[in-house]
Amino acid sequence: MSTAIKAWRRLAATTCIALAALAAASAAQADDYTRTAYPIVLVHGFLGFDQIGPVNMFYGIPSALASGGATVYVTQEPGAQSAAVRGEALLANLKALKATHGHAKFNLIGHSMGGLDVRYVAAVAPELVASVTTVGTPHQGSAVADGIEAGTTATGTTTLVSNVVNALATFLGILSGDTTSTQDSLAALKSLTSSGAATFNATFPAGAPTSSCGSGAASVNGVRYYSVGGSAVVTNVFDPADALMVVGSVFFGSTDNDGLVGRCSSHWGTVLKDNYGWNHLDEINHTFGLRNVFAADPVAFYRAQANRLKAAGL
């Protein structure tokens, strides 16, 4: 074998080793993208659940976060209860996770009513919370809840509707393994109305916007506060849930909304973005990821938010 051929082989081998090392380094870096200092806890909203069969409420999101190195939990709270009762259930779940795994704090991400739950926990047990991120949360209440409350009161159907919703919440709870929670849809509705939100905000003001449709304090009692929301209604004609969003949007008139929550109502703490091309279910990547093909990927948002928390040492 000639000296030249041997030299070329050595060069090729060295190059392959260098490329392999570079690829391994890149892979390691990618695997750390969502590796936060504290676990991420995803908290569902009204009539939500953690998982039913193979379907996670945060569709495809826990696995995407875990693939980047994050420790992720999806909790189960009563589907239909007041924000305070759901918040206490979340607090109990966090204490159990701490006792079992030794976690010191948690990064809480709450969708819709789940955003009220995480604010509750951050207020009553700030020592357990590193950050709060609310997604499509009706911090100022929802026009849909106001409309339902007014409509059922005017028609005398309050008890009938509440019984139906309680039954639905119980059924979803059973499917997801929760057979013990007591459901109270009237209490949930009150928490989601404008008047109920005002009372809740007066009791738990940390992160409240300092101006109409503005931002609030970025950090209170050592807890970081972030919020995000969508401002689209019909985002995919093949998504049957979009019909529900259309009905909900009627209550908002010409005001920007995601089908269930007004654009400005989603503001709390540092507002990351309030006009993603998502409706209320797109915000958790449902129904099964169907959305406007030109809209941002919700899964990518959750990964980016985890990376933001990582960069902040959280």
Image (cartoon, grey):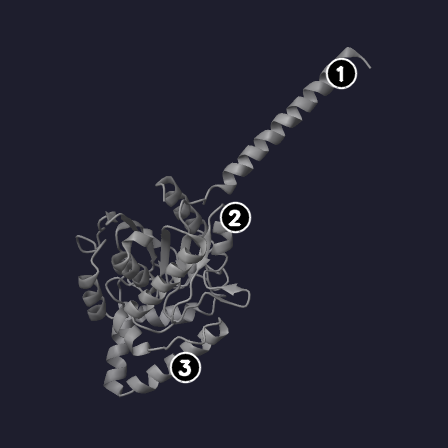
Q: Nearer the viewer, residue 127 or 159?
A: 127
219 up-or-down from 248: above or below: above
Percent x, y for residue 51? 49, 66
Q: Say left or right for 27 vs 248.
A: right
Crowd around label 1: few <14 · some 14–19 · many ≥20 (10 Å)? few
Q: Are marks 3 and 2 in contact (CB under 8 Å)?
A: no
Q: Mark 3 sits on what residue?
A: 167
Q: Mark 1 sits on what residue?
A: 6
Q: CA distance from mark 1 to mark 2?
A: 42 Å
Q: CA distance from mark 3 to mark 1?
A: 77 Å
Question: Mark number for residue 110?
Answer: none
Kindly identify the amino acid type of the residue bearing the numbered disc 1.
Lys
Kindly identify the amino acid type of the residue bearing the numbered disc 3.
Ala
Q: Residue at x 42, y 51 (%)?
A: 39
Residue 256 appears in the picture as rendered:
no
Determine whether the residue tagged by mark 3 lies in a helix, strand or loop.
helix
Q: Nearer the viewer, residue 262 or 69?
A: 69
Q: Residue at x 29, y 52 (%)?
A: 127
Q: Nearer the viewer, residue 231 or 93?
A: 93
Q: Mark 2 sits on what residue?
A: 67
